[in-house]
Amino acid sequence: MRKIHFKISFLLLALSLVFAGLVLAGQTAPQNQPPAAQPNANAAAPNNANTAAPNTAMNQIIDKIIGRETALGKKMQGMHPIVETYLQNLDKDDQLTFRPKSDAYFLGKFDYKAEGRQHSMLNGEGIKDSIFGKISQLYSIKYIPSGFLQMLVVSGPLDRKDYDFEFVRREFLGEVRTLAFDVKPKKGGSGRFIGRIWAEDQDYNIVRFNGTYGPSTTTKVYFHFDSWREYMGNGEWLPAYVYTEESDVGYLLGTRKLRFKGQTRLWGYNVGTSSAQNELTALIVDSDQVKDNIDEADGISPVRALRSWERDAENNIIQRLEKAGLVAPDGEVNKVLETVSTNLEVTNNLSIDPPIRARVLLTSPLESFTIGHTIVLSRGLVDVLPDEASLAMIIAHELAHITLGHRIDTKYSFNDRMLFEDPEAFRRIQLKRDPNEEMAADKKAAELLRNSPYKDKLGNAGLFLKAVDQRAGQLDRLLVSHVGNAMVKGAEVKRMAELKQVAPPLDMTKLDQIAALPLGGRIRVDPWTAKIELLKAKPVALLSPREKMPFEVTPVNLYLTRQLVGQQQQPATTATTAPAQKQQP
Ligand SMILES: [Zn+2]
């Protein structure tokens, strides 16, 4: 129970000077590998559409691709993943090439049948800026219903009558061998896809498509996008990420230019009621083991009763958020966070009952909060924190709330308060604390850190806060919290602000000073189960300051594979609840 614990297992999180800059979600392989060495009979396809005889083998492949895409379009109508879109509007900067000027955020649950195709999960849409509002409209399908789905499934619809398909080459995307085709409409018509598709060569599902729809008009602007799918669930390829980027969209009759980049993530395809149903199945099987483990003597203690009542509220909230696909199921990342908390507890001689747990909120905006004795950090926050000391700073603040006995609102112990539709989650669950509690927690946290193994590394933590300060005026959607208190008030970090004084000066141009990481570089979310894992991307040496990209969204470059995350659990659960959806061979 002493200092041996300090260095435990943070090595995965502790990337100190280097990070996977241009790589999102664990994708370490180069995107463009040379075509496969072995030529295939089909690959002898015409490289241009004017070749005299139609290549029937190639046409059969194209027909299969079209068939799979049409089937996916139908399948998506029954799917309800969470959809999060985060956009950064860019300004030109001599040293950094582009830097964020403002941002926009949208979170919803995909619902094909609902008007607008997506239920917003946010309190207010919060997008006031008119130009940026236009971009958001494209995403927030409320206004242009077809716009969003078009970036998930090739629309048009795709067929050989209206489109020319030109075989480009074989190409590996990660482990998956694909056939790449250039696709363009035969003749004009609005809202037609133009770009490239990559289809895997087993069942001919499109796994990636990249391009735009067109042509744009003065009233309708189509953006460029790169849409990726992942292999998941019952062996299907479903939309997982979309990256959008524009460097010079003219608007106001071409008098002004719009620059932005943005990322859409989809996750939680198989999260929700089904997991509870599975638990029930398990419960019936071994019902002998299901019993209350509080003995009678404990049960009647008033203190126990209070703790138990508060733990009920805590469990209710976590379970509800997990069921909504907003909190990741328990797993390895939580253990890493709990280890940091343990380091702080042990060195401060704290003994906390019930023990501290940690969870990850799956959304991008940077926030942390406590639910009873559970510390919650958002995925976006874990992504951008540069090192263990900065993580310890965040956790120390939350741990301080717990040690100071700051209470959870036990109104959440009443189960009726958890009976709401998923998109209501952030409107129903609000855990903001008053400013006095915040100040007290900061003070206590400073004390916890002073006694901890992190005490000599707090300069980095302060540097992180300075980096937040620097972007606070521009990235306000990233710094708005869904559930807890915001770190920033009035374009300045208020939380743990005194650590800024012990930090070195922030220098954006210094290559070896990494104050904050880009979004998406640390945690991989499995889009089917919403389980998370730490990325194992190899560190990349930075070439220029623009590769530091603090708090920025990056292009998507998935390392595609047919291996399912958590494969061992998957077949069992699908087999018990949905025998019709058998695993594909
Ligand atoms: Zn707080």
Image (spheres, rainbow, N blue to C red):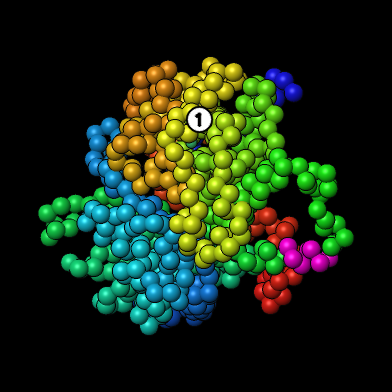
Does the magenta segment cover residue 283?
Answer: yes
Principal secondary structure, stretch drawn in magenta: helix
Horizontal side of 585 relative to 258 (left or right) equals right
Position of residue 331 relative to residue 96, above or below, is below
Horizontal and vertical percent for residue 81?
A: 52, 64
In this picture, which residue range is highlighted in magenta?
279-285
Name the residue at 25% across, 64% down. Answer: 221
Instruction: Note whether residue 471 is visible.
Output: no
Residue found farthest to the bottom: 161
Residue 339 seen from this side:
yes
Is residue 342 toward the left or the right of residue 541 in the image?
right
Q: Which residue is mark 1?
A: 441
Q: Quadrant of the N terminus?
A: top right
Crowd tier of the residue under label 1, counting other residues whose Cα lies within 10 Å: few below 14, some 14–19, many 20 or above: many
Which residue of the protein is positioned furthest toward the right in this rendering? 288
User: Along the line of sight, which residue is nearer the eye, 179 or 504?
Assistant: 504
Q: Considering depth in this image, is 151 or 127 the residue closer to the camera?
A: 127
Q: Residue at x 67, y 63 (%)?
A: 275
Q: Name the residue type under label 1.
A: Ala
Instruction: Give x and y (percent) for residue 146.
Output: 36, 72
Residue 487 part of the magenta-drawn span? no
Badge 1 residue CB within 8 Å of ligand 1: yes
Q: Quadrant of residue 53?
A: bottom left
Nearest the viewer among 16 and 555 is: 16
**Element type at mark 1:** helix
Q: Position of residue 363 (x, y in %)?
A: 48, 50
